[in-house]
Amino acid sequence: GGRAEDVVLLVRPNSSEIHVGPAAYATLLPLIAHWGDITVHALPLTPTNTATTAVTGIRKQASDNADDTGGEAGRGSEESDDDEEDVLQDFKLTALVTMLTGTRKIAVAFTPATTSASASAAEMEVEKWPLLQAYGLEGVGRPGFLTMHTRVTDSWQLLHERCYLQLDRPGVTWELTRVLPAFVQHWADAVAVLDDRTAAHRMALTEQQAGE
């Protein structure tokens, strides 16, 4: 959903780092609190605070210079939405640079359609991501393309088999609250339409016609 669009997750063998937008922090906190050694990069809902705050055993890293970049006391509602968005995007980029510092190899879930393509085509997909394009800007991360100095491999098949096909508690909740009600409504509508038909007409319908 929209709240997860700013999530950036890096999983290492013994630790993890995640960037979350302010609106998603409260929602994701109960899900990631039990992960153990995880560092959370997040700004407060209104970017006015500084410091690093410990929350339920998780290291939540706020911007050390939030007041300088968008949290000047007293501005409040005078700060435009564009300014706030710039602050959030800058902080997300800073978090990405911090995550990738010292990392020489990463695995990314490429779009399934590219898994049969060449390795260079898959790498190009990564380089098209706006966040990684910004990472390569001079003075931000390492200069040049990410794939020039970091080995990128495809993890889609592994994640698909071991994660995406498995339903955990949040997955079941999503299915029950978002997917199932819509399915039940569509099924009821289809049955109501068929009930209006005669038995002979129903028998003559093909599977495609019945679905339509």
Image: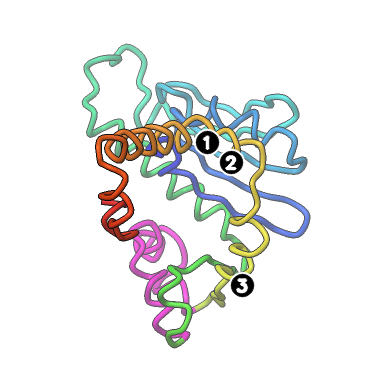
- The residue tagged 3 is 105
Q: Give the residue displayed 32% in from the left and 45% down from the top.
A: 199
Discs 1/3, front: 1
Q: Which sits earlier in the primary sequence, circle 1 or circle 3?
A: 3
Q: Give the residue displayed 52% in from the left and 26% down from the top.
A: 50
- The residue tagged 1 is 174
Quadrant position of residue 3: top left
Q: Does 149 appear in magenta?
A: no
Asked if labels 1 and 2 touch by Cβ distance under 8 angstroms, the answer is yes
Picture quarter with the N terminus: top left
Discs 3/2, front: 2
Q: Is residue 144 above or below residue 100?
A: below
Q: Nearer the viewer, residue 35 or 140?
A: 35
Secondary structure that dominates the magenta span: helix
Position of 30 compared to 193: left or right? right
**SS at badge 2:** helix
Quadrant position of residue 87: top left
Q: Give the residue displayed 30% in from the left and 52% down from the top.
A: 210
Residue 77 on image: x %, y %: 25, 15
Instruction: Estimate the spatial distance between the alpha carbons at disc 2 and disc 1, rounded to whole Å.
Output: 5 Å
Callout 3 amino acid = Lys
Q: Which residues are magenta?
A: 119-148
Callout 1 amino acid = Trp
Q: Which mark is on residue 171? A: 2
Q: Is residue 119 above or below residue 46?
A: below
Q: Give the residue displayed 44% in from the left and 45% down from the top.
A: 92
